[in-house]
Amino acid sequence: MELLKRIWVVVKPFKARDVVEALAPFDSVRDVVVSECRGYGRQKGHLELYEGSEYRITFMPKVRIELVCSAFQLSEVLSAIEEAARTGRIGDGKILVQGVARGETL
């Protein structure tokens, strides 16, 4: 039985294509889902000035990429994601990894 890992990646919208393209060389990566979402991390949004008033923008636009990969390629897949998503600025995103007990194809 193959050991699988589920990976959730949340990145800035302009980095989503780079992340998906970085996953292409990995034959164990499958079941990729990309969706738009909104959220915040440690920075909790930012302030914007509009017509002389300050407004707190709490939820920033993000893209969530979900995928399943082999546990044996996990380290390489995570490195590729980090390299593709990183800009060096606050709010680059998050990566979460979870074990998969069982996967079924419909």
Image (tube, helix red, strand yellow):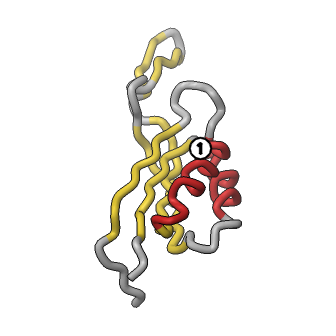
Residue picked out by circle 1 = 82
Q: Nearer the viewer, residue 14 or 50?
A: 14
Identity, as a three-letter code, of the amino acid under mark 1: Glu
- What residue sits 38% from the left and 82% below the top? 1
Q: Quadrant of the C terminus?
A: bottom left
- What residue sits 63% from the left and 74% below the top? 27
Q: Nearer the viewer, residue 9 or 34?
A: 9
Q: Is residue 27 above or below residue 67?
A: below
Find residue 98 and report its image quarter.
bottom left
Furthest-bottom residue in this view? 106
Furthest-left residue in this view? 101
Find residue 11 and report its image quarter.
top right
Residue 14 seen anywhere in this rendered image of the structure:
no
**Residue 78 in the image: x percent, y percent?**
55, 51
- What residue sits 54% from the left and 73% below the top? 30
Q: Nearer the viewer, residue 51 or 4?
A: 4
- Which class describes the residues within 10 Å of circle 1: few (<14), some (14-19), or many (20+)? some
Q: Is residue 2 above or below residue 34?
A: below
**Residue 29 in the image: x percent, y percent?**
56, 69
In the image, taking residue 15 as reference, residue 4 lies left or right, namely left
